[in-house]
Amino acid sequence: MMTMRKVFNKILLGAAAVVTSIQASAIDLDTGNAATEVVIPNAVGAIFEVSPTGGDATLVLRFTTMITNAWFDASAPYHPTAVGVYSNLGRRPAEEATPRNINTAVMYASFRVLNSLFPARSGEWRALLVNEGLDPDDASTDLSTPAGIGNVAGWELVAARENDGMNQLGNEGDKIYHQTPYADYTDFEPANTAYELTDPSKWQPRIVSDRTGIFRVQQFVTPQLRNVTPYSYRNPRRFRAPYPSASQVENYGAYVAQANAVLDASANMTDEQKMIAELFDNKIFSLGFSALFAAQSKGLGLIETMQYDFLTNMAAFDTSIAIWKEKERFNAVRPFSAIAHIYGDSPVTAWGGPGEGTVTDIPADQWDSYLGVADHPEYPSATASFCAAHAETSRLYFGSDELGYRVPAPAGSSRVEPGITPATDMTLYFPTWTDLEQRCGDSRFWAGVHFYPSIPAGQDIGHKIARKAFRFFKRKVAGKRTR
C-alpha cells in the first residue's frame, strides 16, 4: 500500500514526478486516514497538472483550502463541539465518531469538492470511492449517515465557493459563451509590455519559455483574487504594506542600491541557499509537507490532523487575497527589469546560469534570476507572506515554535542545476517555525525574484491575517457560527 508516509519520503528524496502518477491503494477505513493517505496523493497529481511546479500559489492555495475545508466540515459532526464553515450538520453521538465513519464522510465530501475543482478527472474521483468500497452514486443527504454528512458538507462548500469572486466557472463578467475558468474579469493591464519598459517603476511581463522553442508573454495570474471572499475577515483593505519607495525610479539612489543587493546575492548563492529556494518555490513540498510532518511528529489524531491542515491552508489563502490587492495597487517592478534598465548591456557579476557558477562578464540585460519569475508584480512577496501565515498559525496551534523539520537534498537533485547542485548530499534543517518562515522569505531574495523590502512587507501581512485566521478557526472548533 502506498501510504502518505511513503509518498512523503519519496518526495523529500527528490522523486517529485511520483505525485503525478500515484493512485493510492485502498486503506483500512477503520485504522487509516483517508485525507492524508488517499485524498492528498491523488489530489496532488491533479494540482500538479494545473501547476507543474507547484508554484502558481493562487490556484494551489484555492485547491488545497477547499479540499481541507471539506475535511473540516465533514468531520465536524463527529467532533465534540466543532461546526462546519459552510454547513451546520448537527452532532452525531460519541459512539459514532469512529475512524470508519469519519473517513467515509471525508471521502464523500472530498469527492464532491474534487469534482467541482477538477471535473475532467471525474472518473478518477469515482475510482477513489470504489477502491474504498464506497458507492460514488450514493447521493444521500441523510445526516444520520456518513455518506449523507459528506455529501451535504461537500455540496454546501461548493455552492459557497464556486462563485466567490475567483471565477472558477469562468462566468464572471456576465460571460455566457466560451467561459474560461479563472480568467481575469477585472480588465487589468500592465504599465509595460514584455518588449518595452516605459515605466521602470512598474511590473513588466516577461517572455518565458519551457526551453522547447515555445515562448509566451506573462499575464498577471488571477488578478481577481483581490475580490475573493476571505474566511476570517471582511475587507482586505485593512491590511496595507509600506509604500515601496526604493522601487520608484525617481528615488534613483535607493533604486540602484536594491538592484545591486540582488546582484550581490545572486553572485554569492550557496548550494544550501539554492536548495532552500527550490524547496519553497513549491508550496506543496514545503508548506504542505511541513504541516504533515508537524501533525505526525506531534501525534495529532484523525480529526485534529484535518483541522490543523485546514487552518494552515485557510490562513495562507486569506493572506493571498490581501497580498494580491497590494500587488495590484503597487504594480511594482521586478529585479530583472530594474537591473536591465540600470545597466543595459554593461557587464555585471552574478550567477551565470545552470552550471556556470558566478561570472563577472554577464551583460545586465541577459541576467536572470535563479528561480523563474512568477506571473505577477513584485511587491509584496507572496511566498514570504504565505510562509509567515503558515508558521504563525502553527505556533499558535501548537503553543510552541519548535519544529525540527529535516528535508534531504541529495547531491545533484536540483531541478535548476540537475546533476550539479548540491555538490554533496545535504539535509535542510528547520529547527523552528521562525527559522522556516525567515529562510523561506530570504530565499526569494537570494534567488533574485524579489527585492529585500518585499520580504518583511509580506511577512507582516501574513502574521496579521494568521492571527485572525486562528481566531476564526477556534470559534469554528468551539461550535460558534460565524456566518
Image: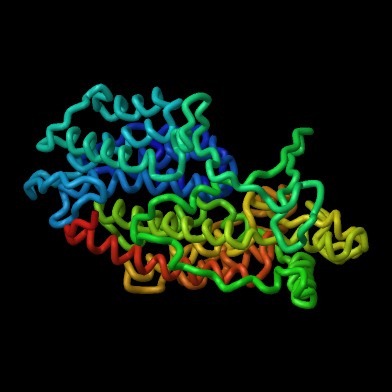
Outermost residue toward the front?
A: 174
User: In x, y percent, where is residue 45?
Assistant: 49, 36
Residue 202 visible in rendering: yes
Name the side, left or right, on which 436 lies relative to 34.
right
Residue at 26% across, 51% down: 85
Outermost residue toward the bottom?
A: 253
Quadrant of the rendered structure where residue 242 is? bottom right
Task: Name the quarter where the C terminus is drawn.
Answer: bottom left
User: In x, y percent, where is residue 165?
Assistant: 43, 45
The answer to whether 105 is drawn above or below residue 447 in the figure is: above
Residue at 45% across, 60% down: 319
Residue at 53% across, 56% down: 324
Count up the numbered dots: 0
Residue 45 visible in rendering: no
Name the side, left or right, on which 2 lies relative to 358.
left
Looking at this view, is 275 or 170 the one in front? 170
Looking at this view, is 244 or 411 the one in front? 244
Quadrant of the rendered structure where residue 448 is? bottom right
Looking at this view, is 398 or 11 the one in front? 398
Residue at 48% across, 34% down: 170
Name the side, left or right, on which 298 lies relative to 45.
left
Task: Name the quarter where the N terminus is drawn.
Answer: top left
User: In x, y percent, where is residue 65?
Assistant: 39, 49
The image's colouring method is: rainbow
Quadrant of the rendered structure where residue 187 is? top right
User: In x, y percent, where is residue 347?
Assistant: 92, 63
